[in-house]
Amino acid sequence: MGADRDKSADLVQGTLELLILRTLATGEKHGYEIAEWIHTASAEALSVEEGALYPALHRLELRGLLASGWDVSANNRRAKYYRLTPSGRKRLKDVTESLRRSSSAINRVLEAT
Amino acid sequence: MAEWLSSLRQRLNALLRRRQLEQDLHDELAFHVAMREEQLRTSGAIDAHAAARRRFGSVSRVREDLRETWAIAPSVTSLVRDLRYAARTLRHSPAFAAVIILTLGLGIGANTAFFSVVNAVLIRPLGYPDAERLVLLEEGFPQARIERLPFSPLDFEDFRVYQQSFEDVAAYRNVPFELSGGRTPERIMGAKVSPELFRVLGTGSAIGRVFSAGEDRPGVNVAILSWGLWQSRYAAAPSIVGQSIHLDRQPYIVIGIMPAGFVFPRRGPLFNGEPVALWVPIAFTDRERVERGTLHANSVIGKLKAGVSLSEARAELDLLSPRIAANYPPAVRNAGFAPKLFALPFREGISGRYQAPLLMLLAAVGLVLLVACANVANLILSRTAGRTREFAVRAALGARRAQVVQLLLCEALLLSAAGGALGVALAYGTIKTAPAVLTRTVPGLEHLALDFRVLAFTAAVSLATAFIFALVPVPTLDRRTPVDSLRDDSSRATSGVRKVQVQRGLVVLTVSLACVLLVGAGLFIRSFATLVATDTGFRPAQVLTASMTLPRAFYATASSVRTFHESLVRGLSNLPGVRTASIATDLPLTIYEVRAFTTEGLNVLNGARHTTTLTWVHGPYFETLGMTLDRGRFFAAGEHAQNRSVVIVNEKLAALAWPGEDPIGKRLKWGAAGGQAPWLTVVGVIRNVADGPLGEERRIHAYEPFRQLPDFFLDGAPNQFGRDVKAAILADGDLRALAVLVRREISKLDRQLAVDSIRTMDDHVSEVVAPQRFVALLVGVFAAMALLLASVGLYGLLAYTTAQRRKEIAVRMALGAERPTVMRMVIGEGARLVGAGLLIGLLGALAVSRLVASLLYQTGSFDPLVFAIVPGVLGSVTFLACALPAWHATRVEPVSALRTE
């Protein structure tokens, strides 16, 4: 499953997945914070309903890329916080690298003419 | 892998803490909505709460989605939802669904129909309590090279006393009766049975009683009727119990009625295998107790004691055999005529013969289903190409692979359920039209029905097929990325290539399976043809037969029997169109009597007794049946009129008794050399004639004029022996018209005599080979079905690939390629697939045909003719399947094809 899948195929599948991983790279967040960050970082990606974030979050957690814990938030509410696991960090690194590689290839092609 | 494990572990955890999970889901989403609401309120929105909920979307739907994500097994709601969606999708492609349902219906229906045959013959319980403890016992005389026979009266009585392994043993024997009194006399089949029989079978009477111990002595004239006879002849009147009926014109008191559905004996065993309409007690007369080594007519069934295994019983039988042999006169025993007892499970005695062919046929029909599944998988693969966008959207929306698989499975389940339902309907129709002649020969077929066992089988098969063809597309599905498939360009076939490879593989599979079945069909057809062409040793054409039994009460003396014979032969010979008529105790293809004999002049060491089957004849028997004389002559008229102590033997007997010598003039006698029987002189040798199923080895056979049957066998009417009359009539013209005249002639001699059905000898022969014909026919049908399905699948694939290549073909034609070139291209593609399938199929057939070699008659499993013809047949049929799409391909208009792209 994981390791032997085609890396470039995973590239585009789950843009949301990439964004989630990226935002959690800078620290623990709960779902609302993640949504806000993604909204700020790329408005188009979340032109769908906000609720669509949660299935993706939970699937990442099930896959072991994220870990979660319950805590009390800044305004005394019970909230679920997510953080990257080592596998999650690795995945972020792999995906970022292959993105970089293909974009530099495109650049090279563009500059060649 | 690690991800999957992690997901499984967390889900299991969640399963154990369901309430906590629910709470968490609720809290998490509520938190988000609350935060959004606060933020909106702070930035001045009017109805912050509603706005927050709107931006979030449907909370309940997200929660439902999350619940599904965390669930290990699919929830009922998700299944219902997927089933509904699947139904809608299928309704939008009715042609696709119809073809699949039809294909599945055919495959599942054939399997269901055939499994119900296997069920009726091999699996269905016999209907007696503890039937697995029932054992059929037989005697054999290994030294004299006599195979399994029923017991002789004395041997049975000894066995009954000595044995310890069985709770009870009972003897039984088929005996035809003339049932009269009241209505017209009818000929029925009855059985003489030990009183213990009903205890052995664990079944009591429905009305009245069964025989009590001690009723098995001569003079006790009581009878038990079967339910069927009670209904048909006595209108189910309970008052019949206690009244008397007439069997062979003797009064018998009816003491009981057996329950409906009770059948014994059962069809199937070689001896005493005919179901009966009534039972009377078996009673061995003193005459039957006279000698050892004769009258082996009584089959024996026993019920093992609880806890005693069959092998333990067999061990006891090995010990009992010499004890019974010790009771034989020394001369007999020392001549090598010592009995050995055998036992086999009663079920095996009934249907053991059919196990191998039936299982082979079940495997064959399973192959047909496999071909159908492969075709359906192919169709589904073709269709998934058109659904890539749908799957891509689902994936983009976060659908897990498992969810897509669940959807595919729901579609497959719907199709399989419909196919299964259609299959059951088809099977029902097929069973209703099962040929009647087989019901007569194959045991158990009269109970052919779709009982719960069969339906469970159908359900299991349908489920299995659903899984097979639902999961086939799955590997081809995964690799595609959502973005790729959202693009419109269908000429990019990276994932498509893999799919086509799988489809090609499926077509090759179906062709090879069809090839295997075709080879099988060829072998069985060849085997059947060889069997039917076997020289039976006589000429059945234009021979009419009639059988009747002279009731003992009215033919109590030998002279009355002989007078009847004489009058009958005379009367029948004088009928118009009749060339010769004769009667005998039995006709070819059956056995009546087995006897031991000794030949004259051999020293004691070589005086080992032989056994032979024996037929008593009166009149020009051999001439009527067209038997071939090898040496000497047939019986002369004088020898039928007076006892001249002559005998005619067949080649086999002559070769055994007097190897290398001229048998004419040699003498033999029944029994031991020192016995009372007179020496008989051999006056003729005839070619071997078939005594049973055509494929079997011919037996040793002897013929005596009926005149020579000693009077004391017939006088006083001790038993039925010698009173069975089978007439054989050689005539020109229409035998059916003659049958009417024959019946009239018989009633002229004895108005009350009940005559069996009058049939032609050709019918007898045909019935004897009915099972083999059935097998050959079925395998042929299965092979045809498989070939048809494979061809359709091939056609479908080629049509699909050429449709995909329309642009390429158009370009070629625009660049000047001629029609034949294009056709050659397409046909070549098909030919490659067929060739591969043929190769694999022939190799597979070579391997598999060895397994069925035992079922073939004088046909080697590598029969060259069959292996040469099958590729030809397969090739020509599949050529048509290729030619059609090839033709269509050439009809492409280059310009329009290019323009559509």
Image (spheres, grey):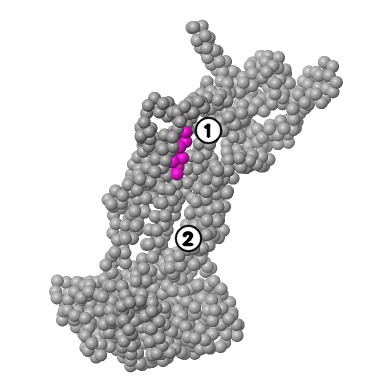
* Amino acid at dot 2: Val
* Amino acid at dot 1: Ala
Decide which of B631, B144 is in the foreground and name it.
B631
Question: Position of A100 compared to B69: left or right?
Answer: left
**Whole-Å distance between the Cαs marked 2 and 1?**
41 Å
Q: Which mark is residue B708?
A: none
The location of residue B834, given as percent across then percent down, is: 37, 40
Decide which of B178, B547 is in the foreground and name it.
B547
| Location of residue B318 with respect to B421 vertically, above or below | below
**According to the image, label 1 marks what residue?**
B385
Q: Quadrant of residue B481?
A: top right
Residue B731 shows in the view = yes
Q: Residue at x 47, y 48 (%)?
A: B369
The location of residue B871, given as percent across then percent down, is: 33, 46
**According to the image, label 2 marks what residue?**
B117
Q: Residues within 10 Å of mark 1 (few under 14, many from 20)?
A: some
